[in-house]
Amino acid sequence: MTRYELFTEEHEAFRASVKDFVQRELAPHAQEWEEKKDFPREIYERCGELGLFGLKYPEEYGGTGPDMIADAVVNEELTLCGAGGVAAGLGAHKDLGSYYIYRFGNQEQRKRWLVPGIQGKAISALAVTEPHAGSDVAALKTKAVKDADHYVITGTKMFITNGSKADHVVVAARTGGEGYKGVSLIVVEKDTPGFTANRIATVGWWTSHTAELVFDECRVPAENMLGEEGSGFISIMKNFQWERIVMALAAVRAAQKTLDDAIAYAQSRTAFGRPVAKFQTWRHRFADLETEIHAMRCLTYHALRKMAAGEDAMREVSMAKWMACDLDWRVADEALQVHGGYGYMMEFPVQRAWRDSRLGPIGGGTTEIMKEIIARTYGL
């Protein structure tokens, strides 16, 4: 075993191949895609060809797993592509929409949506958040009313990654009364009458298709429901753990890259006749951040190890998601500071790291929610 007895030699060899793909086929285009605020759909298919979407799934669906550790490696390495929106778009497809269909769907549904998803030929998304219901999933208002062999969906979803690019969306809707027991999951395909997706502008993740989704009496076949009616809330809670651990892993990886770049810049930039990196104020700040990143890497890998072993890792995952995402943002802020005025200029990539990292403490469960979960695990 290597690296905290978590990654095998095979995992490290796989990491090298993913890193090579990212550096050759994604990173060189990051600036171009940022300017266009988009990246080619063909990238999804390319990832499918390389097997990057199939690591959690068995061969019968075109997967190469299940291997959760290898799948986590993909999230870490995609973070280094240079554009947060690209990593977010690919990750949302891999870890949200597709994974929900696999975990909670039946065989027919998996063949219909998961198989092309693993191939990268169909893009998926997950729609839970609403204009007035983010962290409080049990309070969502989007309704799905049964009408013979269909559900009629009415409501609005907000901040949905891949929302205006997805071929199908896993939608959390209220099929019953108030509270968590009334929530179900239903797959809505993009060409369904009454369904519209409106892309919205964001501070960071410019290449990600973040969107508002509107369902205006959208008729969806009842066979599109994932799992039993009323089981949606529990399904969402179960999948939150994976979403949060991969966000934590990506945040640690991003923080390390941002800090490495900041140190390199500080070594090349001079002030008062010597490199900025030689001033004690910066040397000590860099030392602080390197230490915090190392500590967070240990915590995230510990949480990942527990998850892969099938153990309850809610506490550790919540800790990792909170602290890693906050750290990524703080590292980016310090990195921007050491660049001085250049850090505030759009032509320097540090501003992108700064903008992209700010989503971490919000998405997938806010920092405040993570602290609440941790407190509850201690009976507080």
Image: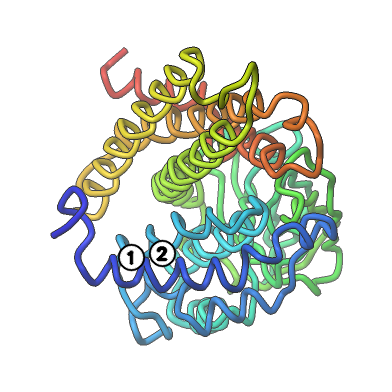
Res 178 seen here:
no
Real-space CA distance between mark 2 and mark 1, rounded to the nearest whole angstrom? 18 Å
The residue lying toward the viewer, choosing from 309 and 236, is 309
Residue 11 in percent (x, y) is at 28, 67
Res 358 seen here:
yes
Q: How crowded is mark 2: few (under 14 residues within 10 Å), some or many (20 or more)?
A: some
Kind of residue at badge 2: Arg
Residue at the limit of the structure toward the front, as seen here: 273
Residue 70 circle label:
1
Quadrant containing the N terminus is bottom left
Would you say 227 lies left or right of 375 here? Answer: right
Q: Which residue is drawn at 19% across and 64% down?
A: 8
Would you say 379 lies left or right of 42 here? Answer: left
Quadrant containing the C terminus is top left
Residue 56 against residue 3 in the figure, above or below: below
Q: Which residue is drawn at 52% across and 85% down?
A: 49
Would you say 128 lies left or right of 319 here? Answer: right
Q: Nearer the viewer, mark 2 or mark 1?
A: 1
Kind of residue at badge 1: Ala
Residue 375 in percent (x, y) is at 35, 18
Q: Residue at x 61, y 51 (%)?
A: 172
- Residue 293: name its quadrant: top left
Residue 146 in percent (x, y) is at 67, 60
Q: Earlier in the sequence, mark 2 or mark 1?
A: 1
Secondary structure at numbered mark 2: helix
Would you say 28 lies left or right of 92 here? Answer: right
Residue 103 circle label:
2
